[in-house]
Image (tube, helix red, strand yellow):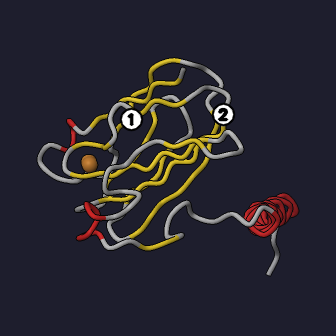
Amino acid sequence: MHVALYERIWMWAAAVLVVIFLGTIFVTAGVHAIEPPGHLETIDPTAIHEHPEFGTPAIRTLSDGSVVVPVVSGMFAFSPDPIEVPANTRVTFRLTSEDVIHGFQIVGTNANAMAIPGYVTQFTMTFARPGEYTIVCNEYCGLMHHSMVGKLIVK
Ligand code: CUA
């Protein structure tokens, strides 16, 4: 079968691009050990209120100066709310849900994770810019999903 020269060039170019794109994904996933932010540890969602960390979620500062923020998501609020953290400090969010799957997105940043009942989702980030940020739930979780917002204050 005869394939025109230009046709062949474009076919090879497309094939090379596919290899480059897939290679980029596998190399970065391998080199940086990328993993989803969730499913690191499990928790009994029916006993959250007796849980030592999530029963009364309190922001705590570790000896290295970084801050840990446990957050319980439930219909239709985040707890604690507002969340107050210092700027230019490593902040580790630890999310879980007491009922259904919720989202946890800090608007204007790249913080975006799911709060899944039975699991603790964890991610760490640093806020360079002090101010007030809105936290929204971006997983449909029920009738009042649209009103599930929280506030993050970076000082
Ligand atoms: Cu919680 Cu939508």
Q: Residue 7: tell me if it is visible.
A: no
- The image shows residue 25 at horizontal and vertical percentages of 73, 63
Pick the front one: 108 or 88: 88
Mark 1 sits on what residue? 135
- The image shows residue 126 at horizontal and vertical percentages of 64, 35
The quarter holding residue 141 reads: bottom left
Residue at image location 68% in from the left, 39% down from the top: 65
The quarter holding residue 49 reads: bottom left
Mark count: 2
Above/below status of 67 relative to 29: above
Residue at image location 71% in from the left, 44% down from the top: 64
Callout 1: helix, strand or loop?
strand
Extreme-bottom residue of the structure:
1
Question: Quick one: label 1, few (<14), some, or many (20+) residues within 10 Å?
Answer: many
Residue at image location 11% in from the left, 47% down from the top: 143
Q: Amino acid at mark 2?
A: Thr
Tell me: is circle 1 under 8 Å from ligand 1. Answer: no
- The image shows residue 31 at horizontal and vertical percentages of 82, 65
Q: Amino acid at mark 1?
A: Ile
What's the mark number on residue 89?
Answer: 2
Extreme-left residue of the structure:
143
Pick the front one: 76 or 44: 44
